[in-house]
Amino acid sequence: MDGKLSSNVKHGWASNMEVSPSFEETIAQHHKMLEKIAATFEADSKLQQDLLQEILLSVWQALERFKGECAVKTYVYRVAYNRALNHVAKQSRIALHTEFEDDYSCWQPDPEQHTKGQQQLHQLLFAIRQLPIMQRQLVTLSLDGLSYDDISVITGLSKNNVGVKLSRAKKALRDVLIHNFGEK
């Protein structure tokens, strides 16, 4: 990759060049984010890994169509969330009636750590999974620090609608946390 494109991709955007960022570089920069998306949309650890593979394949396929009209991160988010939404829809059609397990795998490399922070993370992921899909998506994007503009591009909602729906989603999340864990 030439220096200019490499620099542009490194900063999360590409000018209106017809060249797509490299898959390897993109995944290296955004792998944790993609793991988090998979963990947010899928509780079962095996299905979570399947979803992550589906997301990676979708990103690989989509990068050749990247035109630089938004940041690479925003584009990858949109592809990942679309794949996650398709996965959830497919799983709901399969209608597996499995009992909830306490297997909350997450993207941390050391599952032996059972700190208070880890427990809170598991509780948050559990609570996010209880939300309707659109609220799940908005809360996760917000927690990842994306702006309303970026969230708007990813979800297809207007910027004002993002604010309204995100406010409602945060209230719903707070209610789920209080109901399940007695926390505010």
Image (cartoon, rainbow, N blue to C red):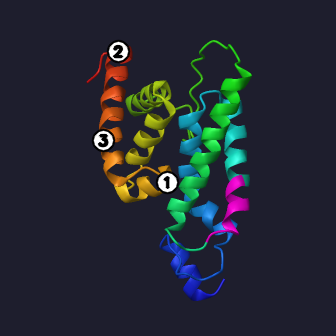
Name the residue: 69% across, 28% down.
Answer: 91
Residue 177 magenta-highlighted: no
For mark 3, what is the residue? 164
Please report the bounds of the magenta region as a residue range: 58-66
Most extreme residue toward the left is 184
Position in image of residue 122 (x %, y %): 47, 28
Position in image of residue 56 (x %, y %): 69, 53
- What's the amino acid at mark 2? His
Residue 147 can be seen in this image: no
Residue 23 falls in image quadrant:
bottom right
For mark 2, what is the residue? 179
Q: How many marks overall?
A: 3
Q: Could you say which disc has been placed on residue 2 in the image?
A: none
Residue 99 falls in image quadrant:
top right
Q: Could you say which disc has been placed on residue 154 in the image?
A: 1
Q: Which quarter shows the C terminus?
A: top left
Name the residue: 61% across, 54% down.
Answer: 79
Tell me the CA gap for discs 1 and 3. Answer: 16 Å
Q: Identify whether 33 is placed above or below 65.
A: above
